[in-house]
Amino acid sequence: MAQAVEDWYKQMPIITRSYVTAAVVTTIGCSLDIITPSNLYLHPGLVMKKYEFWRLVTNFLYFRKMDLDFMFHMFFLARYCKLLEENSFRGRTADFFYMLLFGATVLTSIVIVGGNIPYLSESFAKIMFLSNSLTFMMVYVWSKQNPFIHMSFLGIFTFTAAYLPWVLLGFSVLVGASAWVDLLGMIAGHAYYFLEDVYPRMTGRRPLRTPGFIKSMFADEAVVVARPVNVRFAPPPAEELHLH
């Protein structure tokens, strides 16, 4: 069992392995009182006035306490982060990192701006950690890039991957979780999908080009992928997946 887990961990691509490791270490550290969550959460005032800039990163690493909900989110983080990095972003590690950076920036901006809007500020003030939202963004982007894959939710009903974010959003509402977290992830995911996939097809311009200094951080191997003309993401063959 231990060997299987070790092999699974080693087979993760670099960004996925790094993110999962940081998230697990951070969450375990908080559970053991080695790290204090109050030093990790997103607080615009402390970032701007006290220069606690690490909060812009650490709020994406903490997934609350070690329980079943934590395992559920770790599953989604490891699965969909790995699927994106190994398939849609295969050989483009820098682009994948830039996608996560874009998503984190959008989510942080929404929370900061929303915190200053009357009638909404109270709701946004409750959002202290954006780790779940960033995970949901990856799920959303994956579903947009693989809309024809058939999935099953707990064996109850089947649907195509295009509806996965909405199924998960509905499930969150049913179990009493905040819908804001999932909605923010969907907004960030759709912003990326539109600017990276839809807008370039409409105009021939690609606004989300990965900066050179980020590309210089990663040494990607050349990968040749055959795609239909003028179609960025070809419909993949149907595949039966199960969510637990």
Image (cartoon, rainbow, N blue to C red):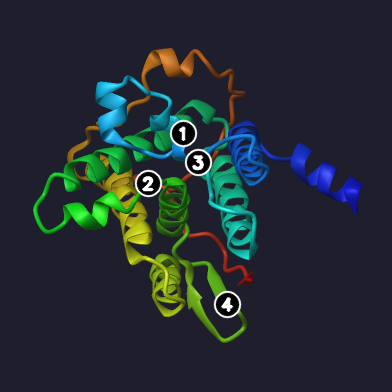
Residue 154 appears in view: yes
User: Is 226 left, or right, of 68 in this rendering?
Assistant: left
Residue occupying the point 87% across, 50% down: 4
- 126 or 238, which is in the foreground? 126
Q: Position of residue 47 (x, y in %)?
A: 31, 27
Residue occupying the point 66% across, 43% down: 28
Mark 4 crowdedness (10 Å alpha carbons): few <14, some 14-19, many ≥20 = some
Q: CA distance from mark 1 to mark 4?
A: 39 Å
- Pointer 3 residue: 37
Q: CA distance from mark 2 to mark 1?
A: 11 Å
Residue occupying the point 34% across, 66% down: 179
Label 1: state its secondary structure: helix
- Pointer 2 residue: 128
Label 4: state its secondary structure: strand
Of labels 3 and 2, earlier in sequence is: 3
Q: CA distance from mark 3 to mark 4?
A: 35 Å
Which of pointers 1 and 4 indicates the residue nearer the eye? Answer: 1
Q: CA distance from mark 3 to mark 2?
A: 10 Å
* Numbered badge on residue 39: 1
Which of pointers 3 and 4 indicates the residue nearer the eye? Answer: 3
**Pointer 4 and pointer 2: residues touching (CB < 8 Å)?**
no
**Pointer 1 and pointer 3: residues touching (CB < 8 Å)?**
yes
Up/down of 143 relative to 209, above or below: below
Q: Amino acid at mark 4?
A: Ser
Quadrant showing the C terminus: bottom right
User: Is 22 left, or right, of 186 in this rendering?
Assistant: right
Mark 2 crowdedness (10 Å alpha carbons): few <14, some 14-19, many ≥20 = some
Which of pointers 2 and 1 indicates the residue nearer the eye? Answer: 1
Q: Position of residue 176 (x, y in %)?
A: 42, 75
Q: Position of residue 20 (x, y in %)?
A: 62, 41
Mark 1 crowdedness (10 Å alpha carbons): few <14, some 14-19, many ≥20 = few
Of labels 3 and 4, earlier in sequence is: 3
